[in-house]
Image (spheres, rainbow, N blue to C red):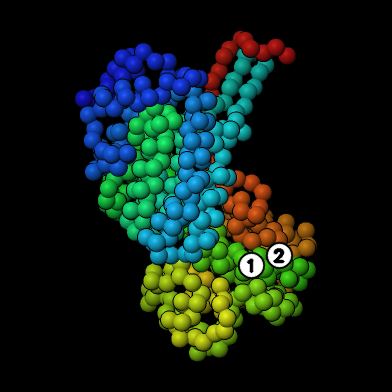
Amino acid sequence: MDIDKLVDRILKDSKIDLAFETEPTQTVSKSVTENTPISGKDGVFDTVDEAVKAAKKAQKLYFHVSLARRKKVIQAIRDTLLPEIEEIARMGYEETNMGNLQDKIQKNYLALTNTPGVEDLNTLTQVLTGDDGMTLYELCPYGVIGAIAPSTNPTETLINNAIGMLAAGNAIYFSPHPGAKNSSACLIQKLNRIVSEASGIDNLIVTIKEPSIEAAQAMMVHPDINLLVVTGGPGVVSQAMKSGKKVMGAGAGNPPTLVDETANIEKAAVDIVDGASFDNNLPCIAEKNVVVVNKVADFLLYNMEKAGAFYVKELSDIKKLEALTVTAKQTPNKKYVGKSAEKILQDAGVSYNGHPRLVLVESTPDMPFAKIEMLMPVVPFIRVPDFDAALAVCLELEHGLHHTATMHSENVTRLNKVAREMQTSIFVKNGPSFAGIGFKGEGPTTFTIATPTGEGTTSARNFARVRRCVLTDGFSIK
Ligand code: NAD
């Protein structure tokens, strides 16, 4: 049956004003369920086509519910998942075997509590009035968003994207990483049940049982997908761009941190160790290089060791680490992505004391640890003669990705210069990198930083189309 006709019939038959402010949701849900020819339990389908079609039908219904109802949907997600957040984090952690549980809990908690909802749409609403009437710019849903999630933040990306995309009035097809398929499917089913109960509409969030690269590519070119939001490495972002659809690409980074001689070095040391070891350096925003001017390098090192870093300077040890963590193709060895500092030191055969959470490797900018996005708590420590050299190295190592950079300095002119030159989507001054996604830093949280396509730290307003609505000769009362 034609989906559009089906939806029209449901809307007509239900005799319900979907722009409700009261509580009629179950009736709508029943109506949808009774009429649907599509199989699938709590949003998990066998095929991409079934899932996308179900989401399309759901979005058509969702478009007609009130903003008040949308807000209730978002609130229901927050309220229902809050007591389960530790369990959700644990599922992702255990399935991917990457990162560390405490930090995963923090990340999931942040995604749930600090992702903006419907209120985010108001920030870009604009009204112009004058002699010729009124023009209104409004943010409207795209329809069905195809959202691709990474293995590094599996459940946190789903929670963050679900809140933002539903707040903007969309339905979502999630394409999780195959390495996180069970935790993702479980969370998607939970989300689906919550959203279905709060909105009265089934299948606003869908996926398939067996996610794969091939299925993700089929989804990318499905005619009923209206927008692609891709969170992952460079391969998947460029693949999505071949689809001919609008893409928000949240790709890879290699964030440097610059420390100059004016910085509060004790604080910088703690901030960098905290940021670079957070979830074993899995976040794309985490410090991946330390670039420090000579004058304060030893003092920074001393304080970073105090804060939990282990310093490796012998060439033989550096070679052991490199052999373990970098492949012949100059990519990170996946076996060690997101593993702990201790596990990496042990497997490399490098002896160490205590319980370090970060490995600092004496490096030069041409070493693989420095150039490659390693996604593990093995971070180069690079000494440079002065501030200008530091900036040059940071620019080189960031590879023009414009993703994230951090800087520790009390010199405002320099802070301004680096912010301007790096042109990164996130630039954190005198703090850990995670302050840039709202953890111990002001502002909302996102796990989708759309750098190649320029949206930066995404939220509901980015998941909506801007529409211009004009009324001539009226509504100007100036
Ligand atoms: P990945 O690129 O291997 O996979 C990401 C997603 O894309 C997965 O769902 C995967 O199944 C899919 N995928 C991969 N290649 C594909 C292809 N050719 N066609 C279709 N789908 C494909 O990345 P990962 O290892 O899961 O995550 C780490 C990467 O993601 C890092 O590079 C990190 O910087 C980046 N990342 C970026 C952000 C951001 O906001 N910018 C956030 C998190 C992670």
Distance of label 1 from label 2 (alpha carbons)? 9 Å
Q: Nearer the viewer, residue 220 or 393?
A: 220
Q: Nearer the viewer, mark 1 or mark 2?
A: 1
- Establish if 252 lies above or below 57: below
Whether residue 42 is visible here, answered yes or no, is yes
Q: Which residue is denoted by mark 2 in the rendering?
A: 408
Residue shown at the point (68%, 63%) measured from the top left: 407
Q: Which residue is denoted by mark 1 in the rendering?
A: 272
Whether residue 145 is visible here, answered yes or no, is no
Taking the view exactly as shown, the residue that stands out farthest to the front is 83
Q: How many other residues sit within 10 Å of disc 2, few (<14), some (14-19) or many (≥20)?
A: many
Secondary structure at numbered mark 1: helix
User: At label 1, which amino acid type do we have?
Assistant: Ile
C-beta proximity under 8 Å, tags 1 and 2: yes
Tell me the quadrant of ligand 1: bottom left
Q: Which mark is residue 376?
A: none
Residue shown at the point (58%, 70%) measured from the top left: 289
